Amino acid sequence: MNDKESRGMMDRMVRGKSIAEWIRKIPVLGGIIKEEEVFWTNPGYARLQSEPLGMGDQIKEASDRLGRFASFLQEAYPETREAGGMIESPLVEIKYFKEKLGEWHGGEIGGSLFLKCDNDLPISGSIKARGGIYEVLKHAEDLAFEHRLINPGDDYSVLRDQAFRNFFSNYSIAVGSTGNLGLSIGLIGSKLGFKVTVHRSADAKEWKKTKLRSLGVEVVEYESDYSAAVEQGRKQAESDPSCYFIDDENSRNLFFGYAVAAERLKRQFKEKGIKVDSDHPLFVYLPCGVGGGPGGIAYGLKEIFKNDVHCFFAEPIQSPCMLVSLATGLHDEVSVNDFGLENRTAADGLAVGRASGFVSRTIEPLLAGIFTVKDRELFRMLSGMWETEGIFVEPSAAAGAVGPVKLMQTEEGRAFLQNNGLMGKMDNAIHIVWATGGSMVPENERKGYLLKN
């Protein structure tokens, strides 16, 4: 950007203020505009009391519903049998990667570092298997109850019968997606017999489109970004009363499906003897696109662990939609494009220009902060994870991996630790990098990603 363009950018108006005025009010926006990596701590981060946050009943309902579908999932997806039909991923300590991080960034990381392997979730190999599959199952249950095809207490394995496939084939599902949500919904929707249409943005990977079409899913492509794909999916549903729209921007069902992960993580902590309390703080680093997945998980974690857990979102430098949303307080009324960014990144699942207003407002007092990552750092993290641990994650899933370094070695991160009385407790800290996808990436794509480091 030359001087003339830079001056023009500063004069651009965003919601009644010039960008220069926004930067004076919120300095981190200056770094965002320059496409620098930034670490932002949330000034609205609240200390929680002991009472429930308010949506615990809905999360329990989601957990119970997934339990009812366990018999169906075991039959439909044999890879879930070992876990009793539960869609869950391992929690793995990554000691060697932790050492590599320390070498790269010139400092030791206190505490223990784990990977929550949603890159290896059953069925669709990404975090979207949680919320996306849950919402399709809920819709199927609602239809089956409405038409008295199943009753409370029935064995849901009957949904594998051809009669149910024939019934669900009278209904369709639409979704707008940059990739993994559409893949999850296409996989489970086609398995049940629904007609599924995925409205796909230009950012989504070709192999995901090919996989969906092989399942009989209709894929509609747009040259524009994620928001346009979502809007077209919404229009399709509005014009067809038999079509159910899964709204990644506003769906509470997706949110609650994601949030179930928190109670599962608590169970894994118990199995591994991991203690989380005021002397053993938990830090979780979650890649963020529109916000539903990381928002739901963060909400669930705060519901369970309260002030002993601190959640940070990771976003690409070109697509920091949640950071812009929360820092300005404008939520879904502002886009990264308003601040001169093009929303282009190799992390297709995070290529979102405008955050979910529902998630932004819900998570505002619960989120510790957000940091941004350059694409080249995503590939370095991806390659480092593979070389040290033999675990493959896709670029989107690598975004959170640098989180512990950002927290402990940036001025803003150290100030957060100091202000929250955490500085002396970091040797006992538990850090979790939440990996969001990777196991379904074709071999030739994997090789290409690994060569980009």
Image (cartoon, helix red, strand yellow):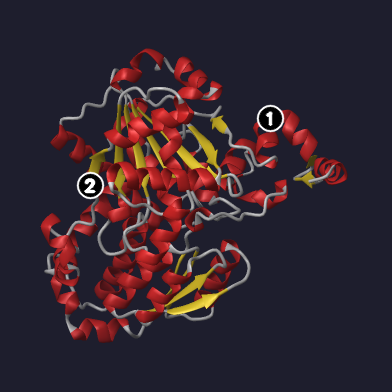
Q: Can you name the residue that lies furthest to the right here?
A: 4
- CA distance separating discs 2 and 1: 39 Å
Q: Nearer the viewer, residue 387 or 282?
A: 387
Say which residue appears at 20% left-offset and 29% top-offset.
274
Label placed on residue 27: 1
Q: Position of residue 217 (x, y in %)?
A: 40, 79
- Does the CB distance between marks 2 and 1 fall below 8 Å? no
> To which residue does mark 2 refer?
90
Q: Nearer the viewer, residue 70 or 39?
A: 39
| Identity, as a three-letter code, of the amino acid under mark 2 | Pro
Instruction: Label 1: state its secondary structure.
Output: loop
Say which residue appears at 39% left-offset and 60% top-offset.
446
Front: mark 2 or 1: 2
- Compared across the picture, whether 87 is left or right of 385 comes to left
Determine which quarter of the picture holds residue 159: bottom left
Instruction: Label 2: state its secondary structure.
Output: loop
Q: Can you name the residue that lies furthest to the front here?
A: 451
Determine which quarter of the picture holds residue 36: top right
Q: Can you name the residue that lies furthest to the top here?
A: 424
Q: Is residue 35 visible?
A: yes
Q: Nearer the viewer, residue 386 or 109?
A: 386
Q: Is residue 249 visible?
A: no
Say which residue appears at 41% left-offset and 47% top-offset.
382
Does residue 452 lie above or below 36 as drawn?
below
